[in-house]
Amino acid sequence: MSVLTYTQEEMMAVEAARRLRDGTVCFVGIGLPSLAANLARATHAPGCVLIYESGTIGAKPTSPPLSIGDGELAETADAVVSVPEMFAYWLQGGRIDVGFLGAAQIDRHGNLNSTVIGAYDRPQVRLPGAGGAPEVARHAREVFVMLRQSTRTFVERLDFLTSAGDRVKVVVTDLGILEPRDGELTLTHVHAGVDVEQVREATGWELRAGDELTTTEPPTDAELDALRRLKG
Amino acid sequence: MAEIVSLADAVSELVHDGDSVALEGFTHLIPHAAGHELIRQRRRELALIRMTPDVIYDQLIGAGCARRLTFSWGGNPGVGSLHRFRDALENGWPRPLELVEHSHAGMAAAYAAGAANLPFGLLRGYAGTDLVGRTEVATVRCPFTGEELAAVPAHRPDVGIVHAQQADRRGNVQLWGIAGVQKETVLASARSIVTVEEIVEELEPRPGAVVLPSWVVGAVCLAPGGAHPSYAHGYYERDNEFYRRWDEISRDRDRFTAWLDENVFATVGAA
């Protein structure tokens, strides 16, 4: 077995970044999505527009923010708008090309749970809740989901449907890439060193593999350099 | 006209047990000092409202101030769970907490409706999610197109509390940077308290700033550092380390209680 020179997380960020075009308007959260969108901006898509739900439009952070409201986002933004304006004019107004979402659970239709594990009234784990996700899922033209793949997360049945999966375009995981085919998330890529069985075992439903199943192009040196510079 | 008073006096006069109280500040200018004063004065049975209950609401909930929470995202941003919030929901400690749960877009629409003196906020949302059965939302039909839209009841808090960078001596308030939903909160609320970093002779106009004229504000209180560990644009940075440390402090009931004793009850609020 060959030793990879990059982490699974780096693979995820690189793969999500590749799918953003120059000029794409992205609604991003903290963590991997923010890293991916900033990587796109630092490499092939310098005109990629980053919107954080705190109201910063066109933010250009030099390092990954811990919070969506970090001061650097406001200082580097083209415009800072109020939260009601952000959700009404910009998100519901249809100005977002790609919305990034994560979740605690996803089902085969791309529906997401970020509310609760267990029963709502007697939670096993109370999660943070909806935040901006339901409307991102509904109003962004395309939704990118970034998640680590396991049977705990990729489930047959959600404990709670927080955000609808209709607009999910791609799910980037640490093992591969899932895309909707005939209304069901289907494995279209496995990352280098991962086999299909491994992905199936990490999925709580009978995962279909697409006819076009291929191996993801590993990160290039240029992509890794840019990513590591961003992470600092 | 806003009165310039101490935070202790403002809370004592304007916030009563059982009130609905909204402390807002979206990642920035979070009114921590005011939240601590609510804890210090042992307010009880509050119906708390906040889009993003984070560390300060974890403290209020853990201190037993709240009977209900209306919110859209409860977490420690960039760190993880709120342990006091979870303990209240999962184990009813120190008391059970009733939830009214929305999305951000729904909360924002509810505040904007409150500020505009409308009975409900309107948005495309909620349909097709399990939030519908768990929150205050209804469907209304557009009288012109027939489209079905979501309606959320307006937020009309008894008290709205926000933090700003500056006020002048007449009680006019100015805040800038990420402005969140603070203007709507103050305008939607029956009474309001604004804590500020500084009281200046004259407010200097700033592009993009939110200005709240003295006559829409109830009380202005000087509370330098009052947003810590969140930040005040132009004054101090976010204390990311504190948010990380809160994860440990809040995990354990005893450690949390000791923290509260030392950092809230044993301290006197801003003058």
Image: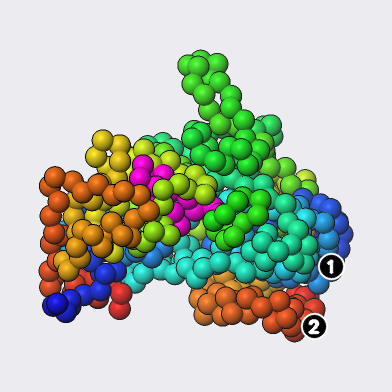
Q: Which residues are magenta?
A: A104-116
Helix, strand or loop under label 2: loop
First in sequence: mark 2 or mark 1?
1
In the image, which disc is placed on residue A160?
Answer: none
Asked whether, in this view, residue A114 is left or right of residue A12, the answer is: right
Residue A116 at x, y percent in the picture: 55, 54
Dot 2 corresponds to which residue? B266
Three-letter residue code for mark 1: Arg
| Mark 1 nearby-residue class (10 Å; few <14, some 14–19, many ≥20) | some
Dot 1 corresponds to which residue? B42
Q: Is residue B207 visible?
A: no
When the figure is inspected, residue B262 is found, relative to residue A99, above or below; the finding is below
Look at 69% across and 82% down and name the residue there. B255
Chain ID at mark 2: B
Residue A229 at x, y percent in the picture: 25, 76
Residue A118 lies within the magenta run: no
Q: Nearer the viewer, residue B244 or B158?
A: B244
Look at 17% across and 69% down and name the residue there. A193
Residue A32 at x, y percent in the picture: 34, 64
Asked whether, in this view, residue B263 is left or right of residue A53, the answer is: right
Q: Nearer the viewer, residue B173 or A120?
A: A120
Residue B164 at x, y percent in the picture: 62, 62
Three-letter residue code for mark 2: Ala
